[in-house]
Image: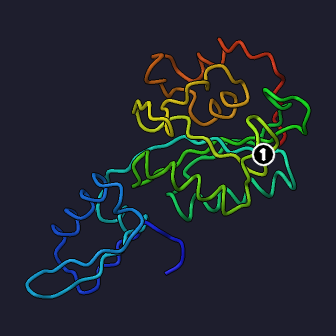
Amino acid sequence: MGNNTLNIIALGLENIALKLALVIAHKALDWLYCCGISYNVGGQMYLIYFTNAEIKDICAFMNTAYLLTGGNLGNREENLATAKALIEEQCGEVVAASSLYETAAWGNTDQPAFLNQALKVETALTARQLIRKMLKIEKQMGRIREEKYGPRLIDIDMLLFNNEKHNYHFLKLPHPEMQNRRFALLPLAEIAADVVHPRLNKTIAALLEECPDELAVTKITN
């Protein structure tokens, strides 16, 4: 069936209430996102496979995530375009994308400049499901994690997910350093200037104005 995980294909399943119940179960149980399940109704077995497009058709409630893609190795523009396409294929609909911005490396400065792009994604995935998908896409594109702040082919960060706040070791929301990084705030402000940071209670535009980061960030595409 390819890699379009999240469209419901319910063979012979006519009951919309049951479909909706399965969608709700999907949102509540992280393990449902990555597998097909069989369901027994009146002695008949149905195969249920979750993918994004048909869940969106069945129920209107979707989550909104703001992601930041970046990289400084290889063909940077091509890599960001590939990441965007894979996110749309595997995670949800990319409903807005910022321009591309170039900035000198942050943290470890002895490396090539980065390109970054902010994406607004509508998804049926939970935040924990989404972060797993993001890591899978990084690996699929060939990222190897060798050193913190080191050069990378692709990096995908989750900046915001609805108004949710998490502090897991693998998922911290909102991104704990976004207010201190101009290379994240500038592209994000282009597509989400009026969105309010759930912890700081300030808009992205206000955080950009107050950002202490003096590293130059340059828009290179519209």
**Label 1 crowding class (10 Å Cα cut-off): few <14, some 14-19, many 20+?**
many
Q: Is residue 82 above or below residue 7?
A: above
- Residue 44 x %, y %: 15, 88
Residue 90 or residue 119, whichever sits in front:
90
For the point 44% across and 30% down, the residue is 167
Query: On the picture, is 101 further left or further right than 174?
Result: right
Instruction: Looking at this view, name the residue that lies furthest to the front.
Output: 146
Q: Amino acid at mark 1?
A: Gly
| Residue located 47% across and 51% down the image | 122
> In which quadrant is the C terminus drawn?
top right
Residue holding disc 1: 71
Q: Nearer the viewer, residue 63 or 106?
A: 106
Residue sitting at x 68%, y 34%? 187
For residue 28, side relative to residue 16 (left or right): right
- Residue 33 drawn above or below residue 4: above
Number of dots carrying numbers: 1
Is 4 placed above or below 76 here? below
> Who's the residue at 42% across and 32% down the image?
166
